[in-house]
Image: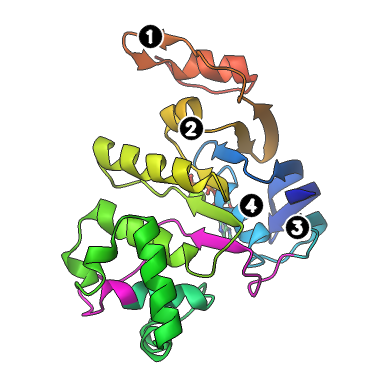
Amino acid sequence: MSAISVQNLTFAYEKQIVLEKISLQVKEKDFLAIIGPNGGGKSTLLKLILGINKIQKGTIKIFEQEPSKKLSLIGYVPQNTNINIDFPIRVIDVVLMGHVPIVNLPKKSFFKKALRWRDEGETACAMGALGQVGMEEYAYKKIGSLSGGQRQRVMIARALCAHPKILLLDEPTASIDVDGQKQIYDLLKVLNKSITIVVVTHDISVVLEYASKVAHINKKLTFHDVSYQANFQKSNGHFCEVEMMQMLGAQKGCSC
Ligand SMILES: Nc1ncnc2c1ncn2[C@@H]1O[C@H](COP(=O)(O)OP(=O)(O)OP(=O)(O)O)[C@@H](O)[C@H]1O
Ligand SMILES: [Mg+2]
């Protein structure tokens, strides 16, 4: 059974077609990297998988089920997480929000809900999720006192809180330094032993070092199994994106 099955999906915002005839199979325990240019449709695809955007043409199945915001099979770490770090909320409260779908929640009710869902069982579960990302000792600190990398670990813990079988992350390391990025991806690698990982990234080294599958999306999708390609070429000590993209068979207009 596929963890995620996308068949012949076409999606448009009003008249602008953003995704065209996309098909994709993600198997259990895959580590899929979704790459592609800004505006290529990556976040849109994730929102369709999550049931945030409504399917117009084609099908998506998550472990044979229709996408829905209520589906706890998927944990989601959104792009540009908009937590107000000045708000005096603790790490544990942020993680507890993982029990409820937070997508499209207005900011005020976002925090109210966080505070309401604090009972003992759920707190234990949230502590477990924090343990999984190595952040247990920060549970009662203010979210605003954490570094960007630590905050992102907390967001991953929040996504893990409902014990998902799939973790979707939309550019989880966008504003994190190189060491912090590596720590996050090493963490995802460990989680990948039991959870299917789908990560949108602009970081080609992720594709090279961590992913088993790659989907390049620019309205259309090209899919590549890279699990058997151990050694990509390097150029002057850094990975050569053009060579890699040629190897993957996708069009990419940049130089290195
Ligand atoms: N809610 C929306 N309403 C109308 N158009 C949208 C909406 N969300 C995205 N778009 C448009 O759809 C296209 C794809 O956007 P999307 O956010 O999926 O791209 P992306 O690949 O995630 O880009 P990035 O790498 O910049 O995050 C863009 O042209 C964008 O302007
Ligand atoms: Mg995006």
Task: Tell me the distance, in whole angstroms, between the alpha carbons under discs 3 and 1.
Answer: 40 Å
Please provide percent x and percent y for residue 243. Answer: 51, 13
Residue 49 can be seen in this image: yes
Q: Which residues are magenta?
A: 67-92
Mark 4 = which residue? 45
Does the closest atom of ligand 1 sit within 8 Å of the Cβ of label 4? yes
Residue nearest the viewer, comparing 63 with 104? 63
Earlier residue among tags 3 and 1: 3
Rounded to the nearest angstrom, the CA distance separating label 3 from label 2 is 23 Å
Name which of mark 3 and mark 2 comes first in the sequence.
3
Query: Is residue 41 found left or right of 111 in the rendered image?
Result: right
Q: Amino acid at mark 2?
A: Tyr
Q: Label 2 crowding class (10 Å Cα cut-off): few <14, some 14-19, many 20+?
A: some
Q: Earlier in the sequence, mark 4 or mark 2?
A: 4
- For residue 227, what is the image quadrant? top right
Say what amino acid the circle numbered 3 marks.
Answer: Phe
